[in-house]
Image: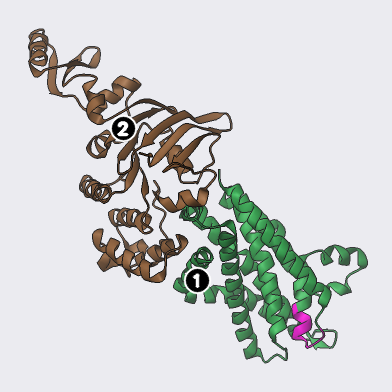
Amino acid sequence: MRGFLAVYLRELLIIWHRLPRMLLSFSVSPTLYLVAFGFGLGKNLTVGDRPYLEFLVPGVVAASSMMQGFGINVEINVARFYLRIFEEFQAAPISNWAYVLGEIFGGVTRAFLSTLVILAITALAGINLHFGPVFFLGVFLNAFVFASLGVTSAMLIRSHADQALVTNFIITPMVFLGGTFFPVEDLPAWARWPLKLLPLTHASHLIRSVAYGQAVPVFSLLVLMVLALAGLCLAYLSVDRARD
Amino acid sequence: MTAAVRVEGLVKHYGKISALSGISFEIAEGELFALLGPNGAGKTTTIRILTGLTRPTAGRAFFFGRDIFSSPLYARRLAGLVPQATNLDLELTVWENLLIHGLLFGMSRGRIRERAEELLRFAGLWERRGDRVRALSGGMRRRLLIIRALMHEPRILFLDEPTVGLDPHIRRRLWGLIKQIQARGTTILLTTHYIEEAEFLADRVAFLEQGRIVALDTPQNLMAALGEVAVDLVDDEGLSTRYFRTREEAEREAVKLSRAGKSVTIRRVNLEDAFLHFTGRRV
């Protein structure tokens, strides 16, 4: 337990020391998405019977919490290849679970901060959405899934450059295809089914449904729970791969 | 008495490259043992294996009689590591770096507070405890790195090239610190490629070359194998050295050589002579 606390506390202290800069940087891309697609492109658009902006905000929350959760991999890379702090963890009498969970919760914490920033920005725009416990559960599960994948990829890669490759091929396409900007349901079936395999599609579906005040999509919730568990196991298994 | 560290036939291959070709040694409790050798001799690999950072290809190792590969958490609790690269969290404060280390090693908050204060005062960093590590000089960072490894009171301390790249006066200050740590009963394994560092600090020295130990003894015995006094001779063929049991013998030879028009210097035999003798190359 102390091992988990040590790893997580380190991430919290890093966030704390960088907080103003970090909040500012969290606000940049969501603001751009909201301005460009919400106010600019989608001002007169509606999706279903709702203004496009109300469709967009939950999608941006899902995409942003995914990116910030996954972004823990950058911190781990810096700790591993630049600061070499990772060796402190490897030489410490802590279990791989303690390390993995500490880093995943570091990613989840970032994801929550970025979500709060987006909610603060959208509050100014006066949007009619519900932000209840299941909304935040969705953010949590989504961030957990991607933080665990972030930890896994950080353990498996051998350099910074490899990491950019993973982000470009997996994360960026998911932002655009995983239900952030347009409803996946409106696509033809051949395109819809592959996109339903993306974790982010389920996260944005869950987060959007509860933000609309609709019933909780239980299937998507279950998918995220299973993926979170699978991601955790993958991350756990990958830690020993980083020992040479 | 059970050795603090016992290593038996340690082998490490990286692909086809052999970093360690079966080394064995023992370190008694409270002893300061140095691994001396050129870059690439296998010093760091040895330390990385003993601290759990690298898995060995073959061989066994024991801390106080207990196998460290079958009890890795036991081994990590006993060991403190000062790595070659200064791996501190630059964005965190001095205090926070020690706090995280203490938690990693299962210390209570109260014990962390006590121990961190004691060590910060010991290393002359108490006044800087609230500063970010980024703001510290190289020498201060190195001292912090050493006391961080001491936070959890390790019984065996591994120092990997602790003074590499530091100014001579900072190096001497660290030597003092290392001697003090040993005086408190800690067993120390140190690697270095500075011969004078091993000569000054170590109770026993192992010369490591290309993954093998080529000689292992006290610095005095290693030097005594050559003699007491050395005569360096510079001529058309370069520098060569001859060794003698007594100063009188050396002086007689020196006089003879300088009469023959050669340039000679008389000095005490040092550990570098022994190293060159046993390995046939310079560090």
Q: Colour in which chain A is shown?
A: green
Quarter of image, res B218: top left
Chain shaded brown: B
Instruction: Name which residue type carries label 1.
Output: Leu
Q: Residues within 10 Å of mark 2 (few under 14, many from 20)?
A: many
> Circle 2 is placed at which residue position?
B205
Q: Residue at x 40, y 32 (%)?
A: B25
Magenta residues? A207-215
Considering only vertical position in the picture, is A185 above or below B20? below
Quadrant where the C terminus of chain A lies?
top right
Q: Position of residue A139 (x, y in %)?
A: 68, 76
- Whether residue A179 is visible here, answered yes or no, is no
Instruction: Name which residue type carries label 2.
Output: Val
Considering only vertical position in the picture, is A151 above or below B60? below
Chain on which label 1 sits: A
> Circle 1 is placed at which residue position?
A12
- Whether residue A186 is visible here, answered yes or no, is yes
A49 is within the stretch colored magenta: no
Of badges 1 and 2, nearer the viewer stands: 2
Q: Position of residue A111 (x, y in %)?
A: 61, 73
